[in-house]
Image (spheres, rainbow, N blue to C red):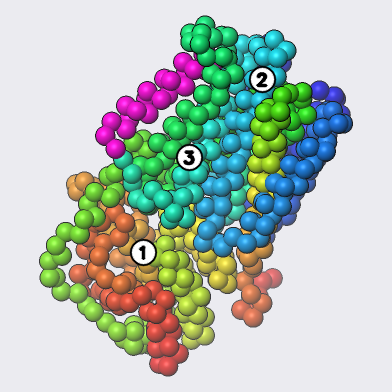
Amino acid sequence: MQELLAQLAILIIAAFLGFELISRVPNLLHTPLMSATNAIHGVILVGGMITLASDGSFAIKVVGFVAVFFGAMNVVGGFWVTNRMLGMFRPPRPRVKKREG
Amino acid sequence: MQVATFLAYLVAAALFIVGIRRLRTPETARSGNTIAAVGMTVALVATLFVIRFESLLLIGAAVILGSVVGAVSAQRVQMTAMPQMVAAYNGVGGGAAALIALSEFYHLQAEGEMSLVAAITVPLTILIGSVSFMGSVVAFLKLQELAFAGSVSFPLQQVVNALLFVGVLVLGANAVTDGAILPFLSPFASMAAVLAASALLGVLLVIPIGGADMPIVISLLNAFTGLAAAASGFVLGNYILIIGGAIVGASGTILTRLMSSALGRPLRKIIFAGIAASSSSKGEDQEDREVNDVGAGEVGEYLSDEAEKIVIVPGYGLAVAQAQGPMRDLMEALEAEGKTVLFGIHPVAGRMPGHMNVLLTEAGVPYAKLYDLEDINPELEDADAAIIVGANDVVNPAANDKEQDSPISGMPILNVEAAERVIFIKRSLSPGFAGVDNPLFYDTDKTMMLFSDAKQGLQDVVEAVKGG
């Protein structure tokens, strides 16, 4: 019971924190934001690893294996494509001379 | 759970938060992504210390396979196909959550430790994860234009959905009560049926939504996958899953709300009345009204000789025509003549939130020139020209007409009317996605219509500007 309450508290705080953090991201960066948060839900891979490591019949191992496969694809693909995308966001190019300070 | 692993999860959570925080500005965003990836690595490595050593081989094999598929697809995907990519990752994330919950159900049963918490969160995780998985598959097929084009609906769709949902609840209850309701179904078979029924529900929920509403679907599925991950955290009693899932759930929810307000329609209407948008697009007879039909030369001349401040409004039609390059050329040609060029980007200009920004950035347009809806409208007031390429609905003043009940009424628009002249580069007078005629087309004093393919039209205008 104690544990469950702690988990609920963490869920609520993390959700509010998420709202706060994400509301401040400008439209310009919404696609990279979504693709980065996409990668973050790949944290489900942690769950996949835990469940695949437990005992089980062959069928259950297959289920766990697919879960880990999906999770790994989610994590690696998500961070990779976000990085690729953000590499394209260049500051104004040098030949458009900008004099600041 | 070992204390060290728990502490490592807290570090990982902190790194996720710092990473997302840095996504606020383009200068820091890339490092933010890297920081979040480091956080993920910390969480994964810490998990290795709480699982049995013998299973590492199997886990390693699955991780390597998944990583290779993920990396190759991430490296190859075109930026125009980002929405599909995001849908695919949403799907696998949700699918993983559903499978984990199913597998944990087996373990809990074997140990005879079915708590009330597990009895609620296991079916819930399977429901959300499975809906997210199949919903994403359908969204992917739609975006890739492989199947389910437009809005697919059938009679009594809502009733079927409701029955499926009730079925999921009954099957779930049966599974966690050891077959108290349907004794002929074993608990595990019953839980597997929850997964199958939820998957079907995912398909049915997404097939009626189409076209301009796709950004909503993508955001919503993102939120769902986050929720599924958080729910699986309760199943496994794992804090990092709860924290990561909750943050993603919040992110998806915010983006969904933003998108539905950018479309000017409540979420409920988009999900349960996906048909509304397509109904009026059946090509009503266009009355022969006069338009100011111009050539590229004329447009080039006006831009060169009379315009100083020019706002370009790109829509998804631009990406369809692969005209981002010529658009950048036009910007450069105009800037070479000392003009100011800005871009006005409507939130729903692409197929997912912020998509058009990425496409223009990829083509080499500096991000400082990309303006939001709220920021560009004041700029349009003193602009000499607004050039609209491959967009119509997002600049249609008919949206402001509250009396008229059109699919776009109430949608916030880019107020191009405020500019001195309005130039449309468009293939024909046909109205856009929403099928609502644009009164600006017929304002012959203000508007110039250049009837052309977006790519060809822009190239011609560039030539005209350079020549003039």
Residue type at numbered disc 3: Gly
Q: Is residue B323 above or below residue B86?
A: below
In the picture, which quadrant includes the N terminus of chain B?
top right
Q: Residue furthest top?
A: B180
> Tag 1: residue type?
Ala
Q: Which percent across, then down, holds residue B280?
A: 22, 52
Of marks 1 and 3, which one's residue comes earlier in the chain?
3
Disc 3 chain ID: B
Task: Between label 2 and label 1, give the one nearer the viewer.
Answer: 2
Q: Tag on residue B391? A: 1
Q: What is the number of the mark on residue B106? A: 2
Left/right placement of residue B224 relative to residue B384 reads: right
Q: Chain of mark 1?
A: B
Please give left or right for residue B106 compared with residue B460 in the image: right
Cα separation between marks 2 and 1? 52 Å
Q: Position of residue A9 (x, y in %)?
A: 65, 22
Label 1 – label 3 distance at C-alpha? 28 Å
Q: Which residues lie in the magenta part?
A: B154-175
- Residue tagged by mark 3? B135
